[in-house]
Image (cartoon, helix red, strand yellow):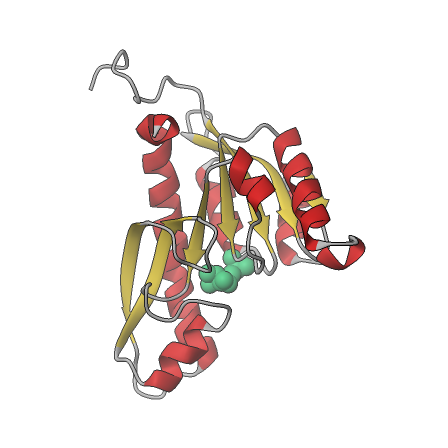
């Protein structure tokens, strides 16, 4: 494809703000994939909704700016949303990536930025914070992960990509989630790479 065509990557890396709540292995996959000079995206900042996350530690180790916005530190959730938007916007991202961020993004953030989320189940099955447990308890034989655009709902936005993972005999919550996360990290890096290569979504 010619680089003159609208929507084609002009060569500037896609700037990301990645939001985390936990260990940050999905964030790490993005950081690792963006390490080379010609990588299609860069992690400009990492934000968390709580103190002491592995995700923020991973970012600090790589010299990536970080911030924390804890809902309980604000008078209202709307105040939290506004301040999160301010801190996200300060990094001037092209895309926000919710990678294990355990909060629903509010109208201020979503009004200012396009965002994608990674979820450890095959949506629309098992939305919410306990997707792996819910899938296991339901007895499904195949589950997986989903990357989707974020809208105002809980794990409801348009699906971009999915990967399937078989539930094995004797799987525990931990063993199943670990296998899902292996696929989730690959999916997320693929999706963000594709969104960096074809930016027509920025005009949609
Ligand atoms: C991922 O499975 C994510 O989908 C879920 O929590 C996990 C976060 O893992 N919401 P990590 O923090 O990226 O290691």
**Quarter of the rendering containing residue 22:** bottom right
Q: Residue furthest left?
A: 1
**Quarter of the rendering containing residue 192:** top left
Q: How many marks?
A: 0
Residue 146 visible from this viewpoint: yes
Q: Nearer the viewer, residue 29 or 93?
A: 93
Q: Is residue 108 left or right of residue 117?
A: right
| In this view, 170 is above or below 197 | below
Residue at image x 68%, y 37%? 87
Residue at image x 36%, y 66%? 121
Residue 63 visible from this viewpoint: no
Q: Nearer the viewer, residue 127 or 108?
A: 108
Residue at image x 64%, y 46%? 47
Residue 123: give x, y in percent of width and height: 33, 63
The quadrant of the rendering that contains the N terminus is top left
| In this view, 142 is above or below 59 | below
Residue 169: give x, y in percent of width and height: 30, 87
Residue 58: give x, y in percent of width and height: 62, 49
Q: Is residue 174 left or right of residue 5?
A: right
Q: Is residue 204 left or right of residue 94?
A: left
**Quarter of the rendering containing residue 46:** top right
The quadrant of the rendering that contains the C terminus is top left
Residue at image x 38%, y 71%? 126
């Amino acid at each position: 494809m010619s680089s003159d065509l609208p929507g084609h990557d002009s060569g500037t890396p896609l700037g990301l703000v990645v939001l985390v709540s936990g260990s940050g292995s999905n964030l790490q996959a993005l950081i690792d994939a963006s390490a080379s000079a010609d990588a299609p995206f860069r992690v400009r900042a990492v934000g968390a909704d709580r103190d002491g996350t592995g995700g923020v530690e991973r970012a600090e180790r790589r010299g990536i700016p970080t911030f924390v916005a804890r809902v309980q530190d604000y008078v209202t959730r709307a105040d939290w949303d506004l301040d999160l938007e301010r801190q996200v916007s300060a990094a001037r991202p092209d895309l926000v990536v919710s990678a294990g961020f355990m909060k629903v993004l509010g109208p201020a953030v979503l009004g200012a930025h396009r965002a994608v989320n990674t979820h450890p189940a095959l949506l629309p099955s098992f939305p919410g914070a306990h997707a792996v447990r819910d899938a296991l308890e339901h007895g499904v034989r195949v589950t997986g992960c989903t990357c989707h655009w974020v809208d105002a709902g809980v794990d409801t936005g348009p699906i971009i990509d999915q990967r399937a993972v078989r539930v094995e005999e004797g799987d525990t919550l931990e063993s199943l989630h670990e296998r899902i996360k292996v696929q989730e990290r690959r999916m997320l890096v693929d999706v963000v790479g594709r969104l960096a290569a074809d930016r027509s979504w920025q005009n949609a």
